[in-house]
Image (cartoon, rainbow, N blue to C red):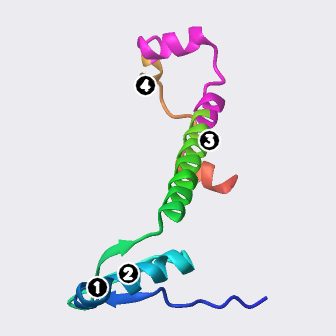
Amino acid sequence: MEQTITMPPIAQVAELQKNYRSLFDRVKKTRLPLFLLKQNRPDVVILEPNFFQEIARKANLYEKNKALKKHTADQSKNKFSELTYFQEKNGSFDFLLQEPDIYSLKDVKQNI
């Protein structure tokens, strides 16, 4: 299914100064954001209040979902017992840093 992309409504800041009422009415009627350009660059976006609240609600849900996924991922990484975690943080396994490598990088690459 082909999706049509439309340009968002745009206006120059000078046009806003002259015709603010008609531009505001258009935003209220269409519920589409109006992009104001200053020197042909986006400067400000005007949103209908209910549309803004809807976007803010979705952004909030997105952030909560993102935080929940991060928390879940962090929990799944902690598969070791609390004792193992404590030992690792206190340097109990530091002696392993002095041990020679059993496998070379070449051996690891061959098994992939």
Tell me the tag on residue 97: 4
Quick check: marks 4 and 1 in contact, CB under 8 Å? Answer: no
Neighbour tally class for label 3: few under 14, some 14-19, many 20 plus, Cα within 10 Å: few
Q: Give the residue displayed 54% in from the left and 74% down from the top.
A: 31
Residue sitting nearer the eye, 23 or 90 = 23
Tell me the tag on residue 16: 1
Q: Position of residue 35 (x, y in %)?
A: 38, 81
Quick check: marks 2 and 1 in contact, CB under 8 Å? Answer: no
Residue 64 part of the magenta-drawn span: no
Q: Quadrant of the N terminus?
A: bottom right
- Residue mark closest to the camera, 3 vs 1: 1
- Residue mark closest to the camera, 4 vs 1: 1
Q: Position of residue 68 (x, y in %)?
A: 60, 38
Neighbour tally class for label 4: few under 14, some 14-19, many 20 plus, Cα within 10 Å: few
The residue furthest front is: 21
Neighbour tally class for label 1: few under 14, some 14-19, many 20 plus, Cα within 10 Å: some
Spatial separation of the CA atoms under disc 2 and disc 4: 58 Å
Tag 4: amino acid: Leu
- Residue mark closest to the camera, 4 vs 3: 3
Quick check: marks 3 and 1 in contact, CB under 8 Å? Answer: no
In this rendering, is residue 27 above or below 58? below
Tag 1: amino acid: Leu
Tell me the tag on residue 35: 2
Q: Looking at the magenta stretch, what is its main secondary structure?
A: helix
Callout 2 secondary element: strand
The segment highlighted magenta reads 72-93
Residue sitting nearer the eye, 94 or 110 = 94
Tag 3: amino acid: Lys
The residue where tag 3 is placed is 69
Q: Give the residue displayed 53% in from the left and 61% down from the top.
A: 50
